Amino acid sequence: MAPANPSVAPRIQPSGATGVLVLADGTILWGIGYGAAGAAVGEICFNTSMTGYQEILTDPSYAGQIVTFTFPHIGNVGANPEDMERGVHGALGAITRELPTSPSNFRSVQTLPAWMAEQGVIGLAGIDTRALTRRIRDAGAPNGAIAHNAQGKFDIDELLAMARSWSGLEGLDLAKDVSRTDTGAWTGGAWTLGHGYAKAGGGARPHVVAIDYGAKDNIFRNLVKAGARVTVVPATATLDEVLSQDPDGVFLSNGPGDPAATGDYAVPVIKGLLERDIPLFGICLGHQMLGLAVGAKTVKMHQGHRGANHPVQRADDGVVEITSMNHGFAIDAATLPEGVVETHKSLFDGSNCGIAITGKKAFSVQYHPEASPGPQDSFYLFEKFVGGLK
């Protein structure tokens, strides 16, 4: 079956179609379903990464989203338990040009479609992903419903109603839905080939309390690698609950949804920590939370940044880091107040990618320094944070 092109909207179902994507504007894209059966509705975004699809699909920051992969061959290395970013998936679905092939990698324990079926993630292949990506770039990320049925039975009117009635990500707080619900010590360290994940080191270590707005586990592993002892608390933890852990520093994690909505309960906590001069380090949503706490504003981006090849420039020395990104909202640099400096910016569109608060040990970045796309350009941020604690 030829790839479905989003420039057309056929109501007639092609022979052999077992999957479909219905956009809110009425566009219908037929394809081959794989992974989990059923239907889901969310924002259609795209990711330009060539590898790391399992980490992407299990990143809680993708809650409420359906990921279009621009690289045509997704699934070639299969799936394995070590490459999960969280125990549950983040993304609702995956859209690919080709059906995943049989895996060819010594670490694979199952095919991508089988793993997705277990995780409840819907797959759709046979789509002209380049055309869909151009559509998102031109018109912004649309709402849509994705569905997979082995018998090819679909209620298009119902799927269209789902897409049109979904509220979208603006104003939506999803952090509470993907956050851990209890407080506990984090024990795992960084992964190495042939050894798996390291154990957390013993001895006296600075204590970092990490607020989980939908964190990737590899962030906690990198904090451990940098020398910290880590305790994770829920997104809704109060200031008193955070302080009761006697932190040397507090980490603000990544997560999904609209930062302004999550800020209703997160910002007062962060303001309280700033008033007490407790060192802070934020990533992605945590970066936006810190920005809101100091009085800046956040904005919904036209298409967002999602991929492992995003160049970011440091303001202090001009060095460019190649970073991994996954965000659809950003801090509006024009709203940064006096005493807050922009430390990093995107070389793709000039959007803000980092801030620091003058006179305090508080800084954050929009990208993911734990993701290590190629060289570990940004691991220094973990060392800077942990090294600066008492």
Image (cartoon, rainbow, N blue to C red):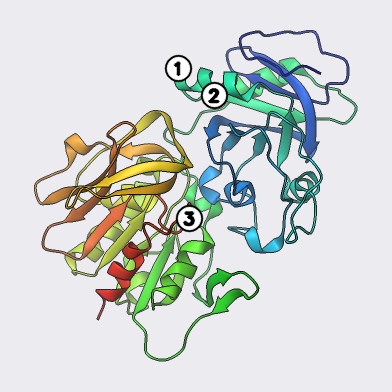
Q: In which quarter of the image is the N terminus?
A: top right
146 is higher (above) or lower (below) than 189 = above
One can see residue 165 in this view: no
Q: State the SS at label 2.
A: helix
The answer to whether marks 3 and 1 mark residues whose Cβ atoms lie closer than 8 Å is no
300 is higher (above) or lower (below) than 184 = above
Q: State the SS at label 1.
A: helix
Q: Name the residue under label 1.
A: 138
Q: Name the residue under label 3.
A: 371
Residue at (50%, 81%) from the top-left corner? 200
The amino acid type found where label 3 is placed reads: Ala
Q: Which mark is residue 133?
A: 2
User: Where residue 291 appears, x then y in whole percent?
Assistant: 26, 48
The amino acid type found where label 1 is placed reads: Asp
Which-is-in-front pick, marks 3 and 1? 3
Q: State the SS at label 3.
A: loop
42 is higher (above) or lower (below) than 338 = above
Residue at (70%, 17%) from the top-left corner? 4
The amino acid type found where label 2 is placed reads: Thr
Between discs 2 and 1, the one toward the N terminus: 2
Residue at (59%, 52%) from the top-left corner? 55
Between discs 3 and 1, the one toward the N terminus: 1
